[in-house]
Each structure stands twice: as C-alpha cells, then as structure tokens.
Image: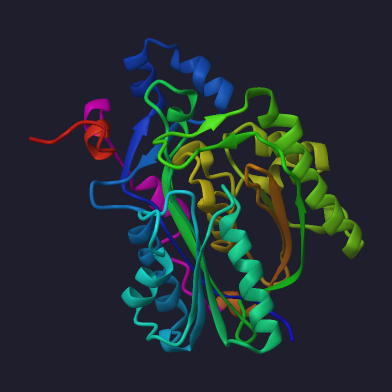
C-alpha cells in the first residue's frame, strides 16, 4: 500500500524581531551577525502561544484544506523539544481541539529538530500496515535561547502539520531513510531553561555528516541524482548550513530557494524542515520531485523522496507560507522580552 501527504497546514506567530534590534541591545554589529548566520529576523510567539496552540492551528488548517473528517484520524504524533508539559502529552490536547474523538493513537516525540519527520515516518508505517486511515504528524516548537547567546538571533517559533494517508494524495512519499549516531552537539537537561551547544560538534560531525549521509543513502537506494529533483529542503538551523550542504550534495541554489524560510522566520526547530517543505508544496506542480532531509541534534537525519500528484492543482494552498512570513509585525526588544516571559508584566 502506498502512503503520502493527503494535506498539510502551517502556523507562524505574527510577531517578528529583527537581528538589528537584538544586536543593538547586546552591542554587536548586526551586519556581522546577519553575514555569519544568514538570518535577518525571526518569529516570536505571543503570550498565549506555545507548542500546543501552534500544533492545533496547523492541524486545523490541514484538516480544513482537505475536508477530512477528524474522526478518521487514527494517530496523532506531535514532535517538539518545547512541549508545554514535562509530564502530559501535547498530542491529546491536539486531538481534543480538532475533534478527533477518543479512538486514536497518541504520542509526543522528541528528537531535537527532527521529531516532526519522525512522526511522518511513524504515520507512514501505520497507514501502510492498514492500522489507520489517516495519521497526523506535527512538528512544532517555541524554541529556547538564553539572552545574549548566539541562539537568540535564530531560535524562533512555528510549526507544520501533515496528514498522512493512502488515498487522494497531493504528494506520494516514494521512500524514506534515516542516519543516526550518538553525537553530543546540542542538549538541555531536565529543569534547565536553556539548551547548551557543543561548539565544534555542531557543524561537520553533527549537521553535515548526518544530513549528507541520509540524503546519499536515499538517493543511492532509488538510483537518483540531485538533478532528478525539482526541489530540495534541508533542516535550517541558520541560513548558511542548508545552502552549504546543498552545494556539498550537488544541489543548486534554485532548487532550495523556495523552501529556505529560515532567513525571515528563524529556526523553528521541529518545524524547520517541514515548514520549508510546506513552502515548496505551496508552489509545486504535478510530477515535481522533492528531497526533504531533516536533522535533529543528538544526532540524526530523516530523508524523504516526495513526488507531487495531480491532486495538488485542486488543493487550496492559500495563505501560503510566504504569505504568512511577509505579514509579520515587528516588535522591539523590550516587547520581545515580555512576549517571551523573560520579565513579569505589571
């Protein structure tokens, strides 16, 4: 039995903060920051926005676009590293909010920034086995960063939801593969408010090794070359890494630019690569082939080959991801602190 994408939805908080504003507070040169990270602004969640609300909004859009009965969703998996509760699932909140009833599998996934694609793989397996008709996989985060840390320029909020099924697909998933190792590049212990990153481990040993290995394995298994893909999207911790890894693998800037959303929305962690995939699906045509490769610190990558079907032409794709990015409202640093609950409101 085949499996693929029956629908998708996204959510990006409307507030933004520019790199210049953060750099002004910390006395840094904004041009150096933008040149080093390839990020110009990031999204900021409102006081009442968290991983659960972002997941619900993305899921509701996915359901509405396809006209799917929520009671036919047999599994809900929410991938995030910023679940609102340490002990209580986000997936049950989503299920109740979308009206999925009670007869569905539910679990929260956590694998740094690739928990969303792990959910897609789990849904694929359950759909192919005949256990469920539809599965809902979500990648959503309100990522954390210590004030003054380099992560503050990129750690943002947003998410995407994908309904995985076998009928009326807008895109078929041809194949998927994963590459995993125990690489300590990024972590946050229980009770700690902000993550730590392992400096020299974050680049070549972690991101580049895992992304290239997963992508190469997938292409070798299918007998494909970079030129066989119309689009490619890679996990986007900043604006530099996905561009560099694309060139290492032999992909062009033209193939990745549609999905390169990090420069204007920041790193949405579990939502990062699949938010980029959503931006590509917003403009994709029947027959287009897309390479998706996620990355999660700790570390691992999931790679997918996705082929767009004729059903995409009748699928409602507005507002698009780029519509949502371009409709943002900019805030200053003091408002940003209030929104991120760094200081108490009177």
Q: Quadrant of the C terminus?
A: top left
**Residue in the image at 36% along x and 65% along y:** 57
Q: Quadrant of the N terminus?
A: bottom right
Q: Position of residue 122 (x, y in %)?
A: 64, 71
Segment tinted magenta in the rendering: 314-335
> On the picture, is 37 further left or further right than 140?
right
Q: Examine the rendered structure and indicate whether residue 257 appears above or below residue 7.
A: above
Q: Examine the rendered structure and indicate whether residue 150 appears above or below residue 7.
A: above
- Of residues 55 and 306, the one drawn nearer to the viewer in this rendering: 55
Q: Quadrant of residue 281?
A: bottom right
> On the picture, is 298 further left or further right than 45?
right
Q: Examine the rendered structure and indicate whether residue 147 appears above or below residue 15.
A: above
| In magenta segment, residue 31 | no
- Of residues 299 and 29, the one drawn nearer to the viewer in this rendering: 299
Q: Position of residue 32 (x, y in %)?
A: 52, 15
- Of residues 229 and 113, the one drawn nearer to the viewer in this rendering: 113
Q: Examine the rendered structure and indicate whether residue 55 appears above or below residue 32.
A: below
**Residue in the image at 56% along x and 21% along y:** 35
> On the picture, is 223 further left or further right than 206?
right
Q: Position of residue 333 (x, y in %)?
A: 27, 26
């Amino acid at each position: 039995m085949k499996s693929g994408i029956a629908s998708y939805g996204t959510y990006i908080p409307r507030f933004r903060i520019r790199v210049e504003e953060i750099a002004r507070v910390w006395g840094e040169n904004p041009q150096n920051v933008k040149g080093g990270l390839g990020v110009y602004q990031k999204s900021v969640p409102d006081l009442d926005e968290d991983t659960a609300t972002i997941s619900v909004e993305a899921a509701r859009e996915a359901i509405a676009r396809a006209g799917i009965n929520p009671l036919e969703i047999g599994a809900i998996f929410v991938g995030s590293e910023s679940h609102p509760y340490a002990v209580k699932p986000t997936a049950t909140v989503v299920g109740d909010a979308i009206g999925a009833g009670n007869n569905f599998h539910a679990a929260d996934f956590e694998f740094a920034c690739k928990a969303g694609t792990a959910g897609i793989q789990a849904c694929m397996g359950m759909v192919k086995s005949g256990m469920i008709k539809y599965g809902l996989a979500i990648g959503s985060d309100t990522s954390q960063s210590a004030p003054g840390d380099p992560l503050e320029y990129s750690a943002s909020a947003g998410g995407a939801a994908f309904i995985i099924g076998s009928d009326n697909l807008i895109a078929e998933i041809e194949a998927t593969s994963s590459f995993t190792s125990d690489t300590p590049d990024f972590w946050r212990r229980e009770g700690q408010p902000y993550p730590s990153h392992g400096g020299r481990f974050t680049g070549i040993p972690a991101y580049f090794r895992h992304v290239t290995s997963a992508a190469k394995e997938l292409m070798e298994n299918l007998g494909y070359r970079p030129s066989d893909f119309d689009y490619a999207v890679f996990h986007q911790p900043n604006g530099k890494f996905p561009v560099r890894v694309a060139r290492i693998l032999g992909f062009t800037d033209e193939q990745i630019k549609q999905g390169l959303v990090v420069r204007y929305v920041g790193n949405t962690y579990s939502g990062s690569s699949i938010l980029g995939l959503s931006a590509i699906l917003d403009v994709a045509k029947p027959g287009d082939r897309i390479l998706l490769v996620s990355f999660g610190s700790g570390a691992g990558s999931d790679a997918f080959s996705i082929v767009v079907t004729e059903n995409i032409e009748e699928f409602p794709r507005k507002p698009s991801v780029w519509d949502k990015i371009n409709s943002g409202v900019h805030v200053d640093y003091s408002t940003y602190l209030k929104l991120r609950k760094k200081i108490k409101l009177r």
